Image (cartoon, rainbow, N blue to C red):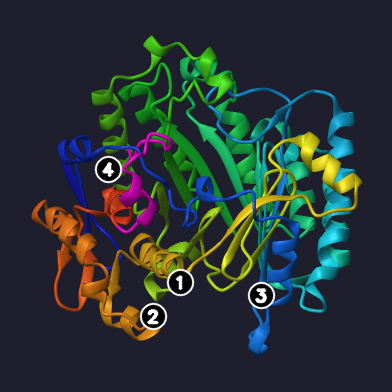
Amino acid sequence: MNAAAPLADGLPLEIDLELIRRMDRNGPRYTSYPTADRFVDAFGPETYHSWLKRRNIGGIRRALSIYVHLPFCSTICFYCACNKVVTRDRNKGRKYLDSLFREIELQAPLFGDDRQVEQMHWGGGTPTFYTMPQLSALREQLQRHFTLMPDGEYSIEIDPRSVDASGMHALRGMGFNRVSLGVQDFDADVQRAVNRIQSEAQTLAVMEAARAAGFLSINVDLIYGLPKQNIPGFNRTLGRVIASGPDRIAIYNYAHLPARFKPQRRIVDTDLPTPEVKLKLLGLAVQRLVEAGYLYIGMDHFAKPDDALALAQRNGHLHRNFQGYSTHADCDLLGLGVSAIGAIGPTYSQNHRELDGYYDAIERGQLPVARGIELSADDLLRRAVIQALACQFRLSKMSFEIAYLIDFDRYFAGELLELQGMADDGLVQLDAKWITVTARGRMLIRNICMVFDKYLRRERETARYSRVI
């Protein structure tokens, strides 16, 4: 099955399922480079603090983005690979909020008087595990210690089963202007197989409430490759989602890794679609979305032409971080909560991934930073290359030569040799000045980015990652 549809920039998106099948392999999603599995325990609170002190050396002031991790869920979705805590005990949630409030108090003074926040995202778990008064109190705590800019981008992930119309209006009143809803699939058999019973009516009602409340953007998450999924059922889900008109749609590949994620052991292997059917599910999704007018942003994400992501891509300002694609490229990132990842200057840091370690650090009055990495000059260069390809689908060699004082062809001689094979397959175009991802290559952008990953080139061991498709 091959399909093509025009994008806003005039370049069609081409879906060659046979080529995708042949090139499918394990690989990172590049929400960071180096990827989080490269972080080291030697990077602790002291290193993190030292980089905060150097944050604005030279008078360059960087705006701030905040990610808040709220890990609790009241029920378990069998497919989930997130860092979450499944419980119906609301006391556990209250204890976590107390620690989160304390972490905010520990972090904020380290930023001095430079606390302007342009972007914030609350993820999980299920942020709407908490009551609206609890979420409002968290928002007030952040507002007390940071300056949340009035024109900022403030988003939250919600489970449509845990919030109603009044809740959506309450969230909008707290300042949230973007919302992301997990849907995955409306098919009843699929929902039972993954233990996520969520009616279409319930979901659409929340979306309508979000519009009525004045949210600027609505995102819907879907997953292909789930147990019991088939072409007719997923086609019905796609039709219903498209008809509801979300501004963004993410289509994620289900990575079945039961050895790593215990809940997935409750999925029956024989219920999973075959690789051939899984590819057809992907092809169907892409075809229907582009026919409906959505643009392929890259790596699982589609957006309407007038959405901020699509506009940022056209203007060359699109960025990719731990929350996926973003319109805020020049922000430092403060991660708050268990397992949260931050990015300050040329560093990444991650909080303790288990609640016990997180609580212990907070109780001792210490930053809960457990690991991280300081990026080398080579890391920074390769990160920029991967960002350019993943976000803009092309890069100017000259711009990198000027910015990083390198001879691009000489520095990346091995990578360009490997890219030549992809050029032969029609995935990229190579010339003396540019590397351009073709219409055929856009669906395989992860493979193209992996060529520039020094750590993968060293190891050639990619089994730890999900498959590209």
Residue 391 as seen in the image, left or right of residue 79: left
* Three-letter amino acid code at the position of disc 4: Gln
| First-in-chain label (1 vs 3) | 3
Q: Which residue is mark 1?
A: 377
| First-in-chain label (3 vs 4) | 3
| First-in-chain label (2 vs 3) | 3
* Residue found at x 76% / y 51%: 171
The verdict on residue 461 being magenta is yes
* Three-letter amino acid code at the position of disc 2: Tyr
* Residue found at x 89% / y 37%: 95
| First-in-chain label (2 vs 1) | 1
Residue 237 as seen in the image, left or right of residue 450: right
Q: What quarter of the picture does the C terminus occupy?
A: top left
* Three-letter amino acid code at the position of disc 1: Ala
x, y percent for residue 116: 74, 74
x, y percent for residue 94: 89, 37
User: What residue span does the magenta drawing correspond to?
Assistant: 452-469
Residue lying at the far left of the rendered structure: 424
Secondary structure beneath label 2: helix
Secondary structure beneath label 1: helix
**Near-viewer residue (211 or 51):** 51
Say the numbered circle drawn on residue 287. Answer: 4
Say the numbered circle drawn on residue 63. Answer: 3
Residue 146 in view in this figure: no
Task: Determine the CA span between mark 2 and mark 3.
Answer: 23 Å
Q: Compared to 396, does 369 lie above or below?
A: above
